Image (cartoon, rainbow, N blue to C red):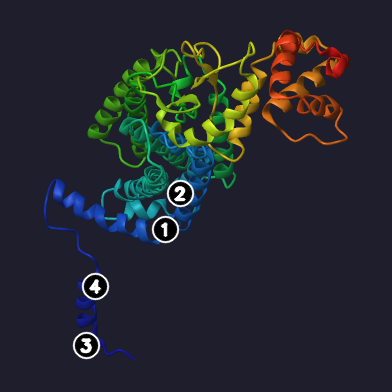
Amino acid sequence: MTDMTDRPRLHEESVRDVPQLPSESGFRAAALAFTAPLRIELTRSGLLWFVPVLVGVGVAVAWNSLRPGVAYWPSATTAVNASVVITGPLVAGVATWLGSRERRRGLAHLRTMSSRSGWLFPAAEMAALLLWVVFSYGVVLLTVVLRTLFMGPSGHLGPSAVLAGAMGLCVHAAAGYLVGRCWSAKVAPPLVAICAFGITLYGSGQYGSPWYVLFPVLIDVPDPFSAWQPGLYWRQLLWLSSLVALLVGVAFHAAWRSRALRVCVAVAAALAVLGGVLTWQLRGVYFQPGEPSFTYACRQDGIKVCVNPTFRAALPDLVTGFSDIAGKLDGTPGEFTGLEQRPRGVGGDASAGFRPIHMDSLGPGWLSEARSEFLQELVDQDACMDADEDRYLLTEAVASWIADDAVSKDDVRASAVNHLRSLSPDESTVWMNQHFADFQRCALAPSDFTRSTR
C-alpha cells in the first residue's frame, strides 16, 4: 500500500511523464505540436495494412495496362494513372472510414478537452492519409519506370502527367475524408467506394465532352502516333490540386473555424475555378491533331521495313515474316517492296512506294496479327460483306496460301490451298494476275482452283 507521504513524489513523476507542449511560439511551435499526432497516424493507424494492398492492386492494374513489348513514356505514365481507376475508389472508401473514426467511436469530446489546437488531430489524419496515398502511387510509378527503362524507351516522361495522376488519387482521399467527417454510418465507406468507381466509369465514356478532362482519371493510352494536347496535364494539375486543397479546407472547417482557414478555402476555390475553366477550354479533346515528330527506324533485306522507333525491336521479325508474302505477291497487282508502320483510320496512308502495316504491341502473336491485318487490307471489305460464305472462304484460302498458314485437311479451304501450293512460282504469279480482282472482291469460284483454268 502506498504511503501518504509518497503522493507528492508520485505526482511530480506523473507530471514529468506527461508530454509537454513545446515552449516555442508561432509556426515552429505548431509544427512541433503537429509532429506527434502525425507520427502516431503514420505508424499505428490502419493505413499500414492498407498501403501494401493499395500498392499491389496499383502495380497489377498498371502492369496490365502497359503495351506488351513496347516502351513508350506517354503510354507508361498513362498506365500508372489508369491504376487510379481501381485504387481511387479503394482510397475513397478507406478515407471515409478514417474520417468517420472520431464520431464513430464517440471521441470528439476528447479533442475539445485537449490543450492542443482542435485542428491538429484531423490534420494529422489527413496528412498521414495523403502521404501514404502518394507513397503508394510513387511505388507503382517506380515499378513502371524501371520496366520501361529496362526496355529502352522512346518519347518523353511528362512530369505533369505523373503529378496530375497523384493528385487524382489525392482527390479521392480528400473527398472520402470529407464525407466521413460529415457521415459516420457503417455503410458510408463501401457506398463512397462504389460511387467513386461509378463516377470513374461514367467519366471514361465522356471522351469529346467538355467535361471529360475534368474527371480525376484519364485512361486513354496514347500510341506512338498520337500526343496529348499541349498543357493538358498542367491545367489538370492546377484543377486537381486546388480541388484537393478545397476539400481539405472544407473538411477542417467543422473542427477549426478561423479567419485564416476561410481565406485558404476561398483561395483554393478561386484556383479550382481557374483550373477548371482552363481545363474545360480543351473541350474534352485528349489528343492533339496530327502526329508527334519522329524519325522512322528502317531495315532493308529484300524488302524495306520502316517502323516507329518505339517498335524498333520488331524489325528483324517483320523483314523475315513479310518476305514470303512479298515473294508471292511479286509481279502481281498486290506487289510491294516496302512496308511502313502507320496508325489506323484517317491519316494512316503510307508514304509513296510503301504499304501500311499496323501494330499495337509486341505481345504474343503480334507478327501473325500484323500479317493477317495486312492481307485483310488487300481485299475490299465492303464487297466481301455482301459475298456468300463459299466465295468468302475461297478468298480466305488465297490469303492463307499467301501467308503460308497451315490449313486442316477437313477445312473447306484445303482444296483451294492445295491447288495453289501445287503451282510453280511462275504459274502462281500468272494465276494471281488472272484472279486478283476476284480475290479482292471475294468473287472467286471453285472452278478457279482447277488446272483447266490455266
Q: Which amino acid does label 2 sit on?
A: Leu
Tag count in the figure?
A: 4
Identify the residue at horizontal 46%, vertical 45% (top origin): 95
- Which mark, residue 226? none
Give how far apart the Cα atoms at labels 4 and 3 are: 20 Å
Vertical comparison of 451 with 178: above or below = above
Give how far apart the Cα atoms at labels 2 and 1 are: 9 Å
**Mark 4 closeness class: few <14, some 14–19, many ≥20 residues within 10 Å:** few
Task: From the image, tell me which residue sits under label 4.
Answer: 17
First of labels 2, 3 by sequence position:
3
- For the residue pair 242 and 184, the one nearer the viewer reads as 242
Vertical comparison of 187 with 277: above or below = below
Helix, strand or loop under label 3: helix
**Mark 1 closeness class: few <14, some 14–19, many ≥20 residues within 10 Å:** some
Q: In the figure, is residue 94 to the left or right of 426?
A: left
Task: From the image, tell me which residue sits under label 1.
Answer: 45
Task: From the image, tell me which residue sits under label 3.
Answer: 5
- For the residue pair 270 and 396, the one nearer the viewer reads as 396
